[in-house]
């Protein structure tokens, strides 16, 4: 194995290419520590230490530091590690580590997200948000089904009614144009046609 290129990434780190392929990112001080120089053969022990100990530990710590500030989905963590230019192998090692301790759990993330957002967003909007965060659609469906079975599913009708209340909607005085505009507003919020039709036909002031 020959170090074919060492490329500066920032003030502290460099990209190392071995046999013309990207290998890893390390700190500049580690170049001397592990004897890495362009067009020089890589020491087997140094390479082994980097790939089996130093870099996996660094990727795990990166995940742990990210998780200190907020929850992440598995895909969000993958994206963060890719941004840090960790290799796919190191990403898998780091994710398996945090998942094994339950620090990353997409199902739990989904449950917590819905519990927090269910009084603010429609089911459709929450589903789209969760998909955008990388949650599998089957996981999302299963979580909503469990909530439904437990009698804790989002009340779409009441939520839509609250949105209309904020818009000062009055079924007795609203014009056709106003109803169309509010229907479009609710649709953009992710409410279904049936819910929109029902809520626009009722006097919502007592809700």
Image: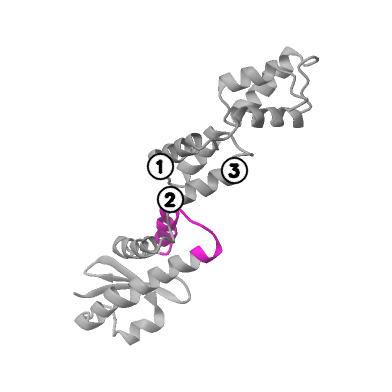
Residue 51 to residue 139: above or below: below
Does the residue at mark 1 contact the one at mark 2 (Cβ under 8 Å)?
Answer: yes
- Find disc 3 in the rendering and name its residue: 117
Q: Is residue 96 magenta?
A: no
First along the sequence among labels 2 and 3: 2
* Location of the N terminus (image quadrant): bottom left
Q: Which mark is residue 106?
A: 2
Residue 131 to residue 100: above or below: above
The image shows residue 145 at horizontal and vertical percentages of 45, 35
Question: Image quarter for residue 34?
Answer: bottom left
The image shows residue 5 at horizontal and vertical percentages of 30, 72
Mark 1 to mark 2 CA distance (whole Å): 8 Å
Main secondary structure found in the magenta portion: helix
Question: Which secondary structure lies at badge 1?
Answer: helix
Mark 2 to mark 3 CA distance (whole Å): 16 Å
In the picture as drawn, the residue positioned furthest to the right comes out as: 173
Can residue 8 be seen in the rendering of this structure? no
- Find disc 1 in the rendering and name its residue: 139
Residue at x 69%, y 15% (from the top left corner):
201
First along the sequence among labels 1 and 2: 2
Q: Which of the pair 136/176 is nearer the observer?
A: 136
């Amino acid at each position: 194995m020959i170090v074919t290129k060492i490329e500066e990434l920032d003030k502290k780190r460099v990209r190392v290419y071995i046999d013309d392929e990207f290998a890893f990112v390390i700190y500049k001080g580690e170049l001397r520590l592990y004897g890495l120089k362009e067009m020089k053969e890589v020491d087997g022990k140094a390479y082994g230490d980097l790939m089996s100990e130093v870099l996996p530990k660094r990727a795990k710590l990166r995940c742990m530091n990210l998780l200190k500030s907020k929850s992440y989905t598995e895909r969000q963590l993958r994206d963060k590690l890719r941004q840090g230019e960790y290799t796919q192998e190191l990403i898998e090692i780091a994710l398996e580590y945090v998942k094994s301790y339950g620090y990353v759990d997409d199902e739990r993330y989904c449950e917590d997200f819905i519990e927090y957002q269910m009084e603010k967003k429609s089911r459709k909007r929450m589903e789209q948000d969760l998909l955008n965060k990388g949650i599998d659609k089957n996981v999302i469906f299963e979580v909503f089904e469990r909530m439904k079975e437990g009698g804790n599913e989002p009340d779409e009708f009441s939520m839509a009614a609250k949105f209309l209340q904020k818009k000062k909607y009055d079924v007795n005085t609203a014009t056709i144009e106003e109803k169309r505009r509010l229907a479009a507003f609710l649709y953009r919020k992710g409410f279904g046609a049936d819910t929109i039709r029902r809520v626009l036909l009722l006097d919502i002031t007592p809700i």
